[in-house]
Image: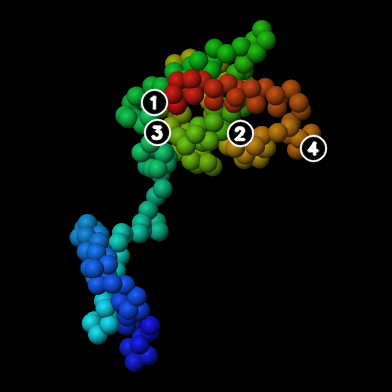
Amino acid sequence: MKNEEDPDFLGGLGDMLPADVLKKVNELLEQLHRKDKDHQGSPVFIYAPGSQYVDKQFNFGKEPHPQTPLRKARGVDSSATASHPAHHKDGELDERIRHCIALLMEEMYGDEPLFNLQGHWQAVYRILVDKGYCRDSDFDGFDAFIRTVMPEKVNKPYKKDSVKQISKTDFALPFERWHYDPQTSTTRKPYDRMAEVARRFKEILEEKGL
């Protein structure tokens, strides 16, 4: 129960727990404290009645600085980097994405190449953002990345300005949320073509383990 004369005294747990349990709890807390190399406070102990109060200045792990970037090189999310099998080496990742874009350029749509408009780079951007390889709305970052992984031959030249136009369209949403709306989308055929470019690029990346 709380001591009115000393508001920092927390003797309640000492009243409730047996001595052997208190000992185990304190040993565990001390071990946690020792493991924290960056610890700036004091260890936490629970004391029985009549002993000293709990030091409340503790920190079992440093919180990230509020301005610590969430993404690392090329805008890749740091949490995804730790688990994604593609992120062994930048050079390997670049080559695999370059190969996937080259395969996309070979896809057919009836009797003509599927990727046949400059605006279709928006579909490439959308899928690379959805998969965490680039930041959403970071067109400068995407520009730097796509120029690094650009195949030697493409069906239509890439231009950053054409990709930036995606922010004014329904394609700015994650691909899984795309749907044709006659009131806001382009006419049906261009929409279907863009959706097919995005779908096939996503499939190609996944077929290659990306």
Other-residue count near label 2 (Cα within 10 Å), few / some / many at <14 / 14–19 / ≥20: some
Nearest to viewer (mark 1 / mark 2):
2
User: Disc 2 vs disc 3: which is toward the camera?
Assistant: 3
Q: Earlier in the sequence, mark 4 or mark 1?
A: 1
Please tell me which residue is depicted at 45% across the width and 26% down the height of the picture. 210
Dot 2 or dot 3: first in sequence order is: 3
Q: Is residue 132 positioned above or below 50 on the image?
A: above
Between residue 130 and residue 193, name the one nearer to us: 130
Element assignment for label 4: loop
Is residue 205 visible in the rendered image? The answer is yes
Mark 4 and mark 3 lie on one chain; the one further toward the N terminus is 3
Q: Nearer the viewer, mark 1 or mark 3?
A: 3
* Residue 36 spot, x, y in % from top left: 24, 58
Mark sitting earlier along the chain (1/3)? 3
The residue singled out by tag 2 in the image is 175
The numbered mark at residue 183 is 4
How would you rate the neighbour count of disc 4 (Cα within 10 Å): few for under 14, some for 14-19, many for 20 or more?
few
Q: Which mark, residue 94?
A: 1
Quadrant in which residue 15 is drawn = bottom left
**Extreme residue toward the bottom, this view:** 5
Question: Horizontal placement of 110 versus 90: left or right?
Answer: right
Tag 1, which secondary structure? helix
Q: Which mark is residue 84?
A: 3
In this rendering, the label closer to the viewer, 2 or 4: 2
Amino acid type, residue under disc 2 in the picture:
Phe
What colour scheme has been applied to the protein in the rendered image? rainbow
Please tell me which residue lies in front, 37 or 122: 37
